[in-house]
């Protein structure tokens, strides 16, 4: 009897509990993260709803009588969503929301859950289209939901975009698609036609697809074909995806677009078997990189736990082998239904997997600090701020904002330090600056006074006072690409040899020398350990402009 009461919840008594979107999942996955395995509504539901446009009241009564009786548990969530949709179209918004909430809360893992959440958002939009409601409508594109619901979703999105001044081809395409989806229901069709009258144009006027990209530049025929295939995938029109991909491969078999279309075809042939919130993580958990990879795995699990476990994480061991990782990436997306990929870790493995993620249209966050994974396309993201980008930003700020023109470099004698040195010299030279002094040091050392003397070209003692010579300073700033702990030790050595750094001024005087670093300095302890020697230092790091964490002590 307890189960029966849950199934037949009175439609006019909706829950008071609010539906909460897992924000971590939204930021990571975007619109790609809300799809499940495709399925067809039960015949009972389809047969009833086919008559809705002629006698909606009768259809509502029939479905609600069924739910109030002894319904088949497998049919219940379908019937709840579809009767909720008929109530919504009829204008019975609170009753409709009650049915949608019942489906979402009683069947949280069912394929129609996302349709129920979308239904609630559409009901709420009739009252006030808040930012949260609009975000839900944007993100929820269920593979299984009534066409009327999908039509009204596109109606809201197209109208909102147009009201904000966006009148692009894509917006007009949404309007036309909304009209086409609404054709099975006279009420919804009339509403779409009325609300989107200024956006609806004939298909012939729209052409066969987009001809320009987001930047306004013309798209090549191959790019146009690939864009049409991706749009068909968004609509879950798998046969159209396959047809577009085949045409593209036949037209330009050696093009990058044809390669991507081939992967997109595989996804369409698999019926886009994605599962909301499932993320594949590719790490070299065994072998030479096993120890750091397992630490990264633990950090990812901890972050997911602290966020309330919004993600279902599927870890695989790449063993740092590109061929292995390629096969695993395909399996994660096409078989296990992952909506995003996190990793890989090694540069060469990232380079092999990134084109597959781009081709499949699955977001991938690469966990490498070298190479340029984003060159594979817009579906591939940097998980770390690369040394190249850090150096470019640092040099640009130092030279353009601070007017510095000449630099010295103190760097660890290792792969990281050597790369940072070379990138810094190239960036300064490209902007017309100079690097007259470069001094490497042992990364395992704790005493850097000898390197500081070399940097200052100090060659003896002042015999009359027994004091060292002042350093010869022929530069405007010093670049230290190392961790904050070692940077503070180097800064102490520089001050010992009487370089005017931070707020410290030696007896010889001289203008202050700014110290420059990378994101390894982003730690509050740099102030406590570096003291006045690190005051006024400049380093670069990524941050989120909307973050409201307590500010770190200023350098």
Image (cartoon, grey):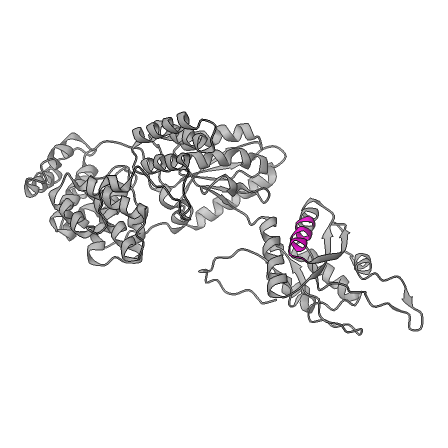
Quadrant of the snapshot with the C terminus = bottom right
Q: Is residue 145 left or right of residue 50?
A: right
Query: What is the chief secondary structure element of the magenta stretch?
Result: helix
- Quadrant for residue 206, please give it: top left
User: In the displayed structure, would residue 348 be above or below residue 130?
Assistant: above
User: In the displayed structure, would residue 539 be above or below residue 267?
Assistant: below
Q: Nearer the viewer, residue 309 or 368?
A: 368
Residue 486 in view, yes or no: yes
> Going 29% across and 42% down the picture, which residue do you hit?
141
Residue 106 in view, yes or no: no
Q: Residue 240: horizontal and vertical position, in percent?
A: 30, 30
User: In the displayed structure, would residue 197 be above or below residue 455?
Assistant: above
Q: Is residue 49 magenta?
A: no
Q: Residue 12: horizontal and vertical position, in percent?
A: 13, 51
Q: Residue 157: horizontal and vertical position, in percent?
A: 27, 50
Q: Nearer the viewer, residue 431 or 217?
A: 217
Q: Is residue 429 magenta?
A: yes
Q: Nearer the viewer, residue 498 or 9?
A: 498
Q: Nearer the viewer, residue 138 or 224?
A: 224
- Residues in magenta? 422-432
Q: Is residue 367 left or right of residue 510?
A: left
Q: Is residue 377 left or right of residue 524?
A: left
């Amino acid at each position: 009897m307890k189960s029966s009461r849950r199934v037949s919840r009175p439609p006019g008594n909706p829950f008071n509990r609010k539906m909460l979107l897992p924000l971590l999942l939204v930021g990571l996955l975007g619109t790609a993260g809300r799809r499940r395995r495709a399925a067809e509504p039960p015949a009972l539901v389809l047969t009833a709803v086919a008559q809705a446009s002629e006698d909606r009241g009768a259809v509502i009564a029939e479905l609600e009588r069924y739910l109030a009786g002894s319904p088949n548990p497998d049919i219940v969530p379908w019937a709840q969503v579809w009767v909720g949709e008929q109530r919504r179209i009829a204008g019975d918004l609170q009753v409709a929301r009650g049915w949608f909430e019942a489906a979402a809360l009683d069947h949280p893992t069912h394929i129609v859950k996302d349709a129920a959440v979308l239904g609630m958002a559409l009901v709420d939009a009739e009252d006030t289209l808040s930012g949260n409601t609009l975000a839900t409508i944007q993100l929820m594109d269920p593979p299984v939901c009534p066409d009327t619901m999908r039509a009204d979703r596109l109606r809201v999105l197209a109208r909102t975009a147009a009201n904000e001044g966006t009148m692009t081809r894509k917006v007009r395409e949404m309007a036309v698609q909304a009209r086409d989806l609404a054709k099975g229901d006279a009420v919804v069709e009339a509403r779409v036609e009325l609300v989107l009258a200024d956006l609806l144009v004939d298909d012939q006027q729209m052409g066969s697809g987009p001809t320009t990209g987001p930047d306004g530049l013309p798209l090549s025929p191959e790019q146009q074909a690939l864009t049409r295939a991706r749009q068909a995938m968004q609509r879950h029109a798998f046969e159209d995806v396959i047809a577009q991909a085949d045409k593209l491969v036949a037209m330009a078999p050696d093009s990058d677009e044809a390669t991507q279309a081939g992967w997109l075809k595989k996804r369409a042939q698999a019926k886009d078997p994605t599962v909301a919130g499932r993320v594949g993580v590719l790490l070299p958990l065994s072998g030479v990189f096993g120890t750091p990879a397992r630490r990264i795995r633990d950090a990812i699990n901890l972050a997911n736990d602290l966020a309330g476990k919004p993600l279902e994480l599927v870890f695989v061991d790449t063993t740092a082998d590109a061929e292995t990782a390629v096969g695993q990436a395909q399996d994660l997306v096409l078989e296990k239904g992952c909506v995003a990929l996190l990793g890989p870790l090694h540069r060469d493995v990232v380079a092999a997997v990134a084109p597959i993620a781009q081709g499949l249209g699955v977001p991938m966050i690469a966990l490498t600090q070298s190479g340029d994974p984003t060159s594979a396309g817009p579906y591939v993201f940097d998980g770390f701020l690369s040394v190249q980008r850090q150096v470019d930003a640092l040099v640009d700020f130092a030279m353009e904002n601070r007017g510095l023109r000449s630099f010295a470099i103190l760097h660890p004698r290792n792969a990281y330090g050597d790369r940072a040195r070379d990138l810094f010299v190239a960036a300064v030279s490209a902007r017309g600056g100079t690097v007259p002094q470069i001094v490497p040091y042992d990364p395992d050392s704790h005493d850097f006074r000898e390197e500081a003397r070399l940097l200052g070209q100090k060659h003896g003692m002042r015999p009359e006072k027994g004091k060292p010579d002042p350093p010869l300073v022929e530069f405007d700033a010093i670049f230290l690409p190392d961790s904050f702990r070692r940077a503070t030790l180097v800064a102490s050595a520089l001050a010992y040899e009487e370089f005017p750094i931070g707020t410290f001024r030696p007896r010889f005087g001289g203008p202050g020398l700014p110290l420059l670093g990378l994101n390894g300095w982003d730690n509050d302890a740099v102030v406590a350990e570096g003291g006045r020697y690190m005051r006024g230092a400049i380093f670069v790091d990524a941050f989120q402009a909307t973050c409201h964490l307590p500010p770190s002590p200023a350098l």
